[in-house]
Image (cartoon, rainbow, N blue to C red):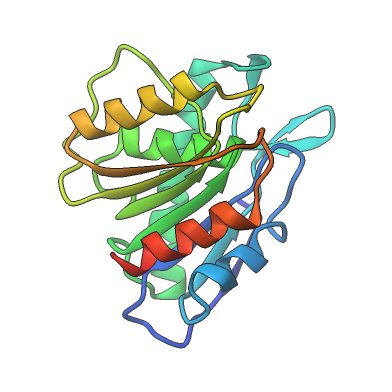
Amino acid sequence: MKHIFNKGKDPNKPTLLMLHGTGGNELDLLPIAGMIDDEASVLSVRGNVLENGMPRFFRRLAEGVFDEEDLIFRTKELNEFLDDAAEKYSFDRDNIIAIGYSNGANIAASLLFHYQNALKGAILHHPMVPRRGIELPDLSGKSVFIAAGTNDPICSPAESQELQSLLEEANAKVELHWENRGHQLTAEEVGAAGKWYLTL
């Protein structure tokens, strides 16, 4: 997968896995990584799927309707990429915090839904529920921050609350942060995520 790896100053810090939104690339969220932890290593990945020329992490059938088969395949592909990257760049595979926005947040949530040890935790900006009707792995010890917009036209407040419930039922510790905004990624929610990160 096309990516950037920036080695951090402190090897004991988590590696931040940056996952962009639809139409973004591996450069998009680098400033946010610096705002969350400027001493951590950063692995920023570009999605392998193109939708009308725009990079994404998995296909969709329509707005808000995921191609479930492709989602499962791409989640496995990303998980295996993380295994390889940890070996290549010598970072702790068990100490990855994903930071994703929109489509990137959805693939990060999918990692949590499908692989018990894929991530130590996640900051999910405007995620949706990746899959329904499956049993999640035991996520004890995992921490998740969800940033949601009360007026988000793509991801309804009910969707955010459902994702929180599903993760909590799998024993993850979840904080749901609301902004009185739509689907955009705001400086305020990044600031709130930064404060949450300090509690890990």
For the point 42% across and 68% down, which residue is it?
A: 15
Residue situated furthest right in the rendering: 53
Name which quarter of the figure residue 93 lies in.
bottom left
Name which quarter of the figure residue 2 lies in.
bottom right
Q: Please count the marks in the image.
A: 0
Question: Is 16 placed above or below 74 here?
Answer: below
Classify residue 145 as left or right of residue 186: left
Classify residue 87 as left or right of residue 48: left
Where residue 88 appears, as percent x and y from the top left, is: 45, 70
Question: Is 87 placed above or below 137 here?
Answer: below
Residue situated furthest bottom in the rendering: 9
Front-lying residue, 147 or 71: 147
Where residue 85 appears, as percent x and y from the top left, is: 46, 62
Question: Is 117 placed above or below 111 here?
Answer: below
Where residue 41 appears, as percent x and y from the top left, is: 48, 74
Front-lying residue, 18 or 177: 177
For the point 31% across and 80% down, which residue is it?
A: 12
For the point 49% across and 17% down, which residue is it?
A: 69
Residue situated furthest front in the rendering: 180
Where residue 20 appears, as percent x and y from the top left, is: 64, 47
Question: Is 66 placed above or below 106 here?
Answer: above
Figure quadrant of the C terminus:
bottom left
Classify residue 198 as left or right of residue 69: left
